[in-house]
Image (spheres, helix red, strand yellow):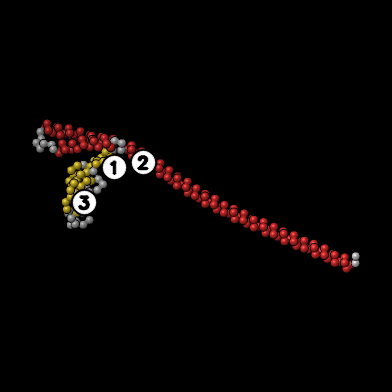
Amino acid sequence: MSEKEKNEELNQDENFTTEQTEATEVQNDEVILEQKEDNLEEEKTLEERFSELQKENTELKDSYLRKVADFDNYRKRMIREKQEAFDYANTNLLTDLISILDDFDRALVAKPAVENAEVIGFVDGVQMINKQLSSMLEAKYNLTCYGVVGDPFDHDKHEAIGSLQMPVAEPVCAEVYLKGYMLKERVIRPAKVMVHMPDGSVEN
């Protein structure tokens, strides 16, 4: 084999080696690119999953806080209802006793004009019993009466039997036909009253 032929064969081998190297580098670049793409897709998937978990965690936290608030409101309502049931358990009994107090008031109003020792003693006895009964109901059951002439008229506490236009600055109770009664903070019978309404002649 001539020197020329040897050189040509060497050049062909070198070219083949170079082509192989280049092909290998291209393959390596393609593999690296595919790995990068896979890693990028994996990162996107992890970010999406992380966002989903964050959203789910927020929803669960909100749901938990709502349930805690609902339970706290339920607990407070049960305590309040239990206390009210205890406080007003005797409402019906006390309402019946109010009728007896009304009878005492009527008896004292209708006492005879002529006073002698016997009448005075009877009236004093009725007044004493009425006072003792009222004091006991107030002290033991928090039952209080209200309604006197001159009280400001209150729709929540008074029942107007009638009204008259008078020179007053605001509606007032002019006459009290029947006392009102409250059990603690609750009106169990409104006072029945005659009301004087402002006629406009008096400024507030």
Residue 92: % across, % down: 27, 36
Amino acid under disc 1: Arg
Mark 1 or mark 3: which comes first in sequence?
3
Image side of residue 162 versus residue 51, left or right? left
Image quadrant assignment for residue 145: top left
Amino acid under disc 2: Arg
Q: Residue at x 20, y 49 (%)?
A: 172
Describe the element under mark 2 as helix, strand or loop: helix
Q: CA distance from mark 1 to mark 3?
A: 22 Å
Label 1 CA crowd tier, 10 Å (few <14, some 14–19, many 20+): few
Q: Residue furthest right?
A: 1
**Which numbered tag is attached to residue 186?**
1
Q: Quickly name the residue at label 3.
A: 171
Asked whether the residues under the numbered discs 1 and 2 touch, taking CB atoms below 8 Å apart as contact, a structural biologist would say: no
Image side of residue 73 versus residue 28, left or right? left
Q: Quickly name the residue at label 2.
A: 80
Describe the element under mark 1 as helix, strand or loop: strand
Image quarter (top left, top right, bottom left or bottom right) of the N terminus: bottom right
Residue 61: % across, % down: 49, 48
Describe the element under mark 3 as helix, strand or loop: loop
